[in-house]
Image (cartoon, rainbow, N blue to C red):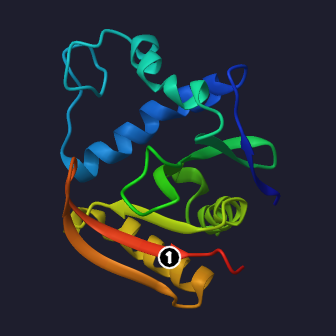
Amino acid sequence: MQISIRLTDSSTKFIINNLYPLYLHDLSEIWGWQPNQYGVFEDNDTLTLQEQNRIFDMWWEHPTVLFPYLITVDHIPAGFAMVSTPPYTPHGSAFYMNEFFVMRSFRGQGIAESAAVQVFDRHLGQWELQTNPTESNKRAQSFWRRAIQQYTSSGFEEEQRETRDDGEKLVFRFNNAKK
């Protein structure tokens, strides 16, 4: 099984755009979201997925600070990882895992861990990632705790705190600059 990540660009962004509603659907189980009256996971009157994707276009408009990776398994799309750098990171972080998603059929096989390591290895410095701290998100919490612990040999910080824009989060920080 070949697990790889690759940066997408404006000619391949449609693949991540195709996966994005699946990601939002998975998150709806954790956050309790429901689609709007048009069947789109947005809290406004977004009519179509195409309209929703326009908001997402910023990921391909700033290629030196935003890094939209496609995760593939044997050349089949399996998920994505969206990495941001300043000014799109929490204060003090050089890199922020903005979004990370692996489709259900690819979970439990080490694919997510491999993809996360590949992403981390491409960006050396101070990292931060956040996830929902509630009981409904135990799987993601366990995944990140285990993956980061193995990646950093337990050299990471973890805390639950109120974030400026996104409510209460479980926050992980580590520095891989010496790798």
From the viewer's perspective, is residue 136 above or below residue 42? below
- Left or right, 84 with respect to 136, comes to right
The total of numbered circles placed on residues is 1
Question: Which quadrant would residue 63 be assigned to in this image?
Answer: top right
Residue 34: where, in percent of width, then height? 20, 33
x and y percent of residue 41 in the render? 29, 28
Q: Position of residue 67 (x, y in %)?
A: 62, 42
On screen, 57 above or below 138? Answer: above
The C terminus appears in which quarter of the rendering? bottom right
Residue drawn at x 57%, y 52% as measured from the top left: 105
Q: Nearer the viewer, residue 167 or 50?
A: 167
Query: Label 1 is placed on what type of residue?
Result: Phe
Query: 59 above or below 83?
Result: above
Residue in the foreground of this view, choosing between 130 and 109 = 130
Q: For numbered disc 1, what is the local secondary structure?
A: strand
Q: Is residue 81 above or below residue 34?
A: below
Within-10-Å neighbours for mark 1: few <14, some 14–19, many 20+: many
In the image, farthest residue toward the bottom: 154
Q: Quadrant of residue 28?
A: top left
Report the residue at 39% width, 65% height from top: 140
Image quarter hosting the N terminus: bottom right
The residue under label 1 is 174
Task: Give the percent coordinates (x, y) of residue 126.
Answer: 53, 69
At 58% from the left edge and 41% from the top edge, which residue is drawn?
65
Position of 79 compared to 51: left or right?
A: right
Q: Residue at x 37, y 46 (%)?
A: 26
